[in-house]
Each structure stands twice: as structure tokens, then as C-alpha cells.
Image: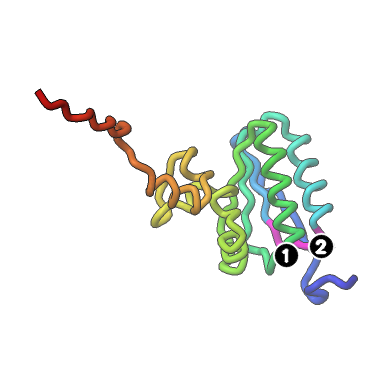
Amino acid sequence: MTPPYPFDPPLRLEAVTGIDAGLLKLALKGHLGHGSADDFLDQTCGHLQDRPRTTVLRLDCAGLTGMDSVGLSALLMLHRRTTAARITLHLDARPPAVDRILEITGCLAHLDPEAAGAGGGRRSREKAYRQPWEEVISASLPTGPPPRPAEPETTA
């Protein structure tokens, strides 16, 4: 099978060095997809192993030329690994095409709960991970105490 974008440059990761030992910044350049997803995961996890005190991983996505479903799967796998390692993952400077994929698939709220909030505002962690249909159901449920059954009238 040929890659969907054979003319895109291969994905490159560039570490952006900084003073903070708990922060790791990686700049992504190229297409994140079928041909590059495994290398992306290997290289990113390698950077994290080289810096064991990392608590925040920021991926600069400005250089991404595109992403397919396999690339999205790689991002989700990275999110699982960073969450298990108690590392906060941020996707910075996402191009519109990447944002669109994340919004259509419903992964934006999962990968970046702050960006998924109304107007880009912060949402609670519980609400950020809820699906839209869950909010519709919870909005239709009564919020007060259950109604008391009517007592039968007695005639005296």
C-alpha cells in the first residue's frame, strides 16, 4: 500500500532545549501518518527516557503538513504512555488540518481538554472527557430530589 501523501517530507522531531528539566519540547515537521507513526513513537519515547525528570511534554505541531488515522493513533498511544508516566502532554500550534481531524474524531477533548472548552476556556477534567451525547442525556435528567408519591385522599 502506498502512503496517502507520497510527496510529503518524512516526519522529523527536533528537541528544543530549555532550562527547565521538567519540560521537554519537541517540534514536529512533516507528515504524521502510516509511514512515520512508529518512528514518531520510538523517537518521542526515546527522548522521554533520556530525560527521566520530565513532567510536561509539549509537541510543537506548527510544522506538521498533515496527519492520517495512523498518525492520530500514534498521538493517542503517546497520550496513554505519557499519562501512565504522569507526564502532561500538550499539542501546541496545531495547524487547522490537524485541529479538524481531532475535532471530527472527538479526540480534541481527549488530547487537549483546555482547547475543547467553550471559547477555548478551561473545563473541568470530568467534563472534558465526557462525550457530547452524555451531556445531552445529563441535561435531560431531573436535577432535584425524586417527586414524592401522592398520598391517597381520605374522606372523613
Residue 87 % position (x, y): 64, 35
Query: Up-down: is 59 above or below 102?
Result: above
Residue 57 % position (x, y): 63, 42
Q: Which residue is mark 2?
A: 34
- Assign a secondary structure to mark 1: loop
Q: Would you call the spot at circle 2 few (<14 residues within 10 Å), some (14-19), or many (20 or more)?
A: many
Q: Quadrant of the C terminus?
A: top left
Pick out the residue farthest to the right.
1
Query: Up-down: is 96 above or below 41?
Result: below
Query: Which sits in the foreground, 99 or 58?
Result: 99
Q: Which residue is mark 1?
A: 68
Q: Which residues are magenta?
A: 28-36
User: Residue at position x 38%, y 44% from top?
Assistant: 141
Label 2 amino acid? His
- Picture quadrant where residue 79 is located: top right
Marks 1 and 2: in contact by CB < 8 Å? yes
Quote the CA–CA distance across marks 2 and 1. Answer: 7 Å
